[in-house]
Image (cartoon, helix red, strand yellow):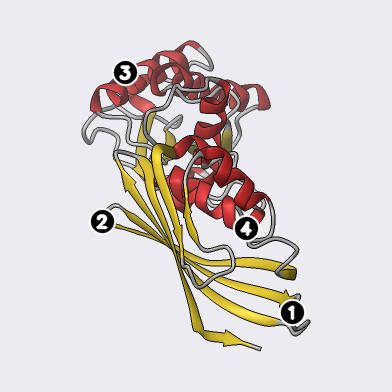
Amino acid sequence: MPFVDISLVRGTSPEYRRAVSRAVHDALVTELTMKPDDDFQLIHELEPSAMVFPRDFRGGPRSRDWTVIRITDGLERGPQAKRRFYTTLVRLLGADPGIDPADVFVMMTLTPPENFSFADGVIGTDVVAIEALDAAAQNPGSRESYTKDEIAYAITQLFAHRDTSRILPMLRDDYVMSLPESLPYGGDYTGRETFEDFFAKTPGGADVWESFSSHVEQVIEADGYFAVQLTNTAVPKATGVPVVLYNLWLFEVTGGRIGGIRLYADTARVRG
């Protein structure tokens, strides 16, 4: 996830810039466990007059080859890993393209994953969750608990796309899903197969609705619960008249697993 911004004095060769890029990337992969294909960099060349620095403050002596490397990371790596990274970085830069360690200036900034979007308008927390859940899917039973971001992503996928694959492993064996008895499909549901079957089709089935679509307004996490606000647009088979239904789903999470699910259907806010 690190994003790297490198500033050099104007006049370096393409080979020089490639060597700097490679050294920074290799140091990140080696010491900060960055994925080899996670390689986002911008390299700038500046006029000497645009690079202002003291020759001997807290290091040096610095030369015309002063190199500034700014790294924005989404994960806290810890001081020991950073210490190793700085040491490896100056060693690699010294080997090729031959930058003196005194000329290497590094700044690392931590920003949470939600401040990243790699492409397609997808928030960084979802990207991290997808990668973690994909890895878990390759090793069934390898995860005993899930993070808040992973659960929030799985819940969003459930309602936005009726995709149960992400959330099924998160259900506790003794989970209970409770729906209001006033609904045609009200009652308590248990078991993963029952859960999967319920969300595989329109709630209540074709006997109740001609069409039914859901929009996730927001997912809020607090004190071991996830509250999901939905706006549903549907056409009841009985009337054929489109209606808008407002629902709140509450997911209870204990130890990183979902133990209880409850639907609150706001019939007072049904709009025809």
> Which residue is found at the position 53% from the left and 17% from the top?
97
Between marks 1 and 2 in the image, the one whose residue lies nearer the viewer = 1
Camera-nearest residue between 250 and 20: 250
Q: Are marks 3 and 4 in contact (CB under 8 Å)?
A: no
Q: Which mark is residue 160?
A: 4
Between marks 1 and 4 in the image, the one whose residue lies nearer the viewer = 1
Residue for badge 1: 238
Residue for badge 2: 223
Q: With respect to residue 23, does 270 lie above or below?
A: below
- Mark-to-mark CA distance, 1 and 4: 25 Å
Sooner in the amino-acid sequence: mark 1 or mark 4:
4
Task: Point out residue 69 in the picture as x, y percentages from the top left corner.
Answer: 43, 35
Local crowd at mark 3 within 10 Å, few (<14), some, or many (≥20)?
some
Specify whether residue 111 is in view.
no
Sooner in the amino-acid sequence: mark 1 or mark 2:
2
- Mark-to-mark CA distance, 3 and 4: 43 Å
Sooner in the amino-acid sequence: mark 2 or mark 4:
4
In the image, is 159 to the left or to the right of 103? right
Q: Residue flagged by tag 4: what amino acid is it?
A: Ala
Sooner in the amino-acid sequence: mark 3 or mark 2:
3
Q: Residue flagged by tag 3: what amino acid is it?
A: Arg
Sooner in the amino-acid sequence: mark 3 or mark 1:
3
